[in-house]
Structures are given as C-alpha cells and as structure tokens.
Image (cartoon, helix red, strand yellow):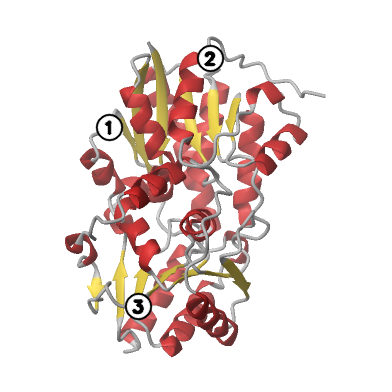
Amino acid sequence: MKKVCVVVGSRANYSSIKSVMRAAKAHPGIQLQVVAAASALLDRYGSVVKLIEKDGFEIDARVHMLVEGETPHTMAKSTGLGLMELPTIFDYLTPDVVLTVGDRFETVATAVAAAFMNIPLAHTMGGEVSGTIDESIRHAITKFAHIHFPSSKGAAERIIKLGEDPESVHVVGCPRMDLVAEILRRANDGLDNGELKRGVGDQIDFDKPFVMLSQHAVTTEFGQGIEQITASLQALRRIGLPVMVFWPNADAGSEDIARGIRIWRESGNADGMHFTKNLPTETYIRLMARTACLVGNSSSGIRDGAFIGTPVVNVGSRQSGRERGANVIDVSYDADAITAAVERQIGHGRYDMDPIYGDGTAGEAITRTLAETDEIVVQKRIAY
C-alpha cells in the first residue's frame, strides 16, 4: 500500500486539497497520512485542524512553525522552522509520496524537506501566474517536484517550459472545484446559521442582498495593508449592503490588514458588517453562490467565482496575471474605483459558469495517478 502524506498549512491549503484527501482515504491502494501545520493549528486563523478532524480525517502529526509578527522577517523564519521540523515528521511517517499544495511559505518547507530526503514530491496548482512572492514560491516548488498536477492547460505549458518532463505533468483541474461542483449540485441545502453567527459584528440576513470582503496581505507591498483594506471598507460602506468580512491569511503584512479592520470597527464604521475568522468550505461556497459581489484579492474569486458565476471585484496586484473569467473586474486600491466596480457587478448579477480551473473531477484523477504510478524517479533533469 502506497503511503501518501499531505501537509496542510492553512485554510486555503485545506480547501484546495480536501477532495484529494477524501479520494485517497477511500482508495484501497493508498494509506493517507495528514500533517497539520502552521496557521492550520491556530485558533486566531479559525482552527482549521478542527475542521479537518470534523471531516473524518486523522491527524498523523502536527507542526507548530508559525513565528509571531507576520512580517517578511518572521515569514522567512517560519519557513526555516518548518524545514527543521518536517524532516523529523517525514522520517517518522516514511511516506512514499509527499503531496504539497500551491504556493504558500509552508509549502516551501515541505518541498525542500521532501526533496532533500529523496521522497517523491507531488505538487498541485503549479505553473500559474499571479503576483507577490507566491509566484516565485510556486515556480521554485515546480523545480523540486517530481510529479505535477496543474489546474489548467496554460499552467501545464509553463511547467513544461520550465524544463519539466511532459510525462510528469497531468492536467487535472483544481481540486477545490470538486467541492464547488458537489456543493452546487446540492443547491437546495440551506446555510449553516450556527457557523454564520460566529464572529463579531452585526448579524446578516443572507436571504437578502449582501456582499463579501476577503482581502489578504500582498507580501511585496508590505506596510501598505492598512491603507489597502481601508479603501475597500470605505467603498463597501458607500454601497450600503450588509458585508461579510473575512480575516486575512497568515502572511507577511496580514497584521496590517487585521489592524486596519480593527481600527475601522472600533471607529464606529462597521454598521451592517459581520467579521469572521473562518468558515467551513461548504458554507463559504454557498455564500459565494448567493452574494451580490465578492470584493478583495482572494484567489477564490478567480477560481471558485468563475465556476460559480459570482460577480467579483479584484482589488490590487495579488492576483496579477492569473487566468480569469468574465466574472472579474480588476481595480486599484482606490475607494472610488472599487465603489464603481461593485455597483457595476451588482447591476450585472450572476455570470455564466466558466470551468477555467477544472470540471470537478481533480481529486479522483490525482489519487488514481498517484496510486497507478509504479515508480516516481527522484533524479531531476531538465527535459529539452
């Protein structure tokens, strides 16, 4: 039986790999191993580890690697701390394959540890173009990885241009789309009001028009987060609809985003706004299917939004260059521009579904490929 170890370091990691974990757990030829790390373990980022366990997955190991501060300095240290801890975990679990997700700093530690230990490394969502340090991380992990599961044909072409063997590249779509497709098939299911009442601020009637704000730090624009999130909050206050505001991810600069939200709230500007750390993926997707507009810079607007047809206003540079559908309007960090774009999206309403990032079958495809690949060669060579 092949042991496949998945390292989950954040809420974004989990929602982007859950369908693979589920398929791997059910596959008779695979033993799933789960390592929870970094912000996935922390209450202030929503205790993602509790969601993982609630979904029926056993946690094989926990890696505390997040250094307080959310600065470029501490992000680098967190990566180093993860690189010190993960080899011990891998040595204990002896996986046959390590599966790493996307482009976050904890993913770097996972990739380097596995590669240095001659453990075959599988990577999802490589080859994409975006902004910030994430793009550098993503392409670097591609060069460490031995088997690639990109979300789109364009991403696969970039992986091959980086010198990877075309036979190691499998276009499967984004595993998160599996969850989106499954949730949308159960369209008549209601919202989990218990989950939605958690957090602070005014309660929202989700049967009436509302907007969502999910905005994260841009690591290459460190120090500008307060101004950036304030512009979005100012714009949404002008719109006048209730707003569901999500706490930022654990990246360099996230404390500035969080501080901007706290200043806004404590200044008495938060009428009609509800603030939450995290929601189960199912609840979040159902909100996206209902919201009048999603505002911010989360990749969920680009990925999930295209599949769902959610009107999205993408603010700033965090998603620069990423493939997107007609549902996205890009704007700068300017309250007037954001306001105008949100009004335009509300006036437009729902968009047609666009499966840029897959058709909802990635989890099974990745699991099948991992199970059926007899040998993954760890010696890397550039394919000419």
Outermost residue to the left: 194
User: Reading the chain from its start, which is encountered first: label 1 or label 3?
Assistant: 1
Identify the residue at horizontal 52%, vertical 46% (top origin): 105
Residues at discs 3 and 2 in contact (Cβ within 8 Å): no
Image depth: mark 1 or mark 2 in front: 2
**Where is the C terminus found, in terms of image quarters?**
top right
Task: Tell me if label 1 and label 3 are in contact, CB under 8 Å.
Answer: no
How would you rate the neighbour count of disc 2 (Cα within 10 Å): few for under 14, some for 14-19, many for 20 or more? few
Position of 207 with respect to 317 (left or right) is: left
> In what element is the residue under mark 1?
loop
Q: Disc 3 vs disc 2: which is toward the camera?
A: 3
Of 254 and 181, which appears nearest the observer? Answer: 181
Q: In the rendered view of the protein, which quadrant contains the N terminus?
A: top left
Closer to viewer: mark 1 or mark 3: 3
Can you give x and y, in whole percent of width and height, for residue 118 in the image?
A: 55, 17
Q: CA distance from mark 3 to mark 2?
A: 48 Å
Give neighbour class at mark 3: few <14, some 14-19, many 20+ (Cα, 10 Å).
some
* Residue visible at 27% across and 54% down in the picture: 43
Q: Is residue 305 left or right of residue 170?
A: left
Q: Earlier in the sequence, mark 1 or mark 2?
A: 1
Q: Amino acid at mark 2?
A: Thr
Task: Identify the secondary structure beneath mark 2.
Answer: loop
Identify residue for label 1. 59
The picture quadrant where one finds residue 165 is: top right
The residue singled out by tag 3 in the image is: 209
**Residue, disc 2:** 373
Distance CA(mark 1)–CA(mark 2) = 25 Å
